[in-house]
Image (tube, grey):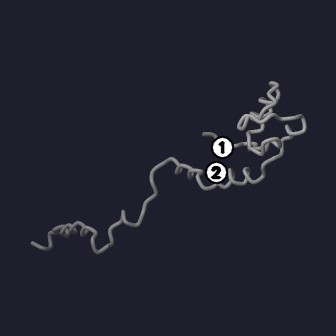
Amino acid sequence: YELFEDPVVLEGDGRTYEREAIQDWLRRGNRTSPCTGVMLDRASTKLIPDAAMRERVAAFNAAFTPAPPPPAGPPPLVASQFLPLSHAPPPPPEAPPPLVASQF
């Protein structure tokens, strides 16, 4: 299925069509409704913009437009990736002081 881009109502049958499609239908000499088969006179081929359908399509697009993808690069750091200090490994032991001759 495709959503309407430029919905119009054909006055002769009251149905909504894509403007380009119904104009092409009429330009090819068809004088019947594509949906109902009703004969159309010249006056009933008037096209009226379908504002209500346009609003419904806009609402649908707003509700179902996917979120943009996240930016490329490494994922952000989060607090759970860090251990609290109480869980951190102990620091390495200090080296004993060097021996000096006066200690012998």
Q: In this view, does 65 lie above or below 21?
A: below
Q: Position of residue 82 (x, y in %)?
A: 36, 65
Which residue corresponds to mark 2?
A: 61
Cβ–Cβ under 8 Å for marks 2 and 1: yes
Label 2 or label 1, whichever comes before in sequence order: 1
Q: Which of 4 and 14 is in front in this view?
A: 14
Give the residue type at disc 2: Asn
Q: In this view, does 37 lie above or below 52?
A: above
- Position of 63 relative to 21 (above/below): below
Residue where numbered disc 1 is placed: 3
* Depth order, front residue of 25/69: 25
**Helix or strand or loop: what does disc 2 sit on?**
helix
Snapshot quadrant of residue 101: bottom left
Q: Residue at x 89, y 34 (%)?
A: 42
Identify which amino acid the numbered label 1 is placed on: Leu
Image coords of residue 60 (percent x, y): 63, 53
Judge left or right: residue 19 versus residue 64.
right
Q: Picture coordinates of residue 81 (x, y %)?
A: 36, 63
Disc on res. 18: none
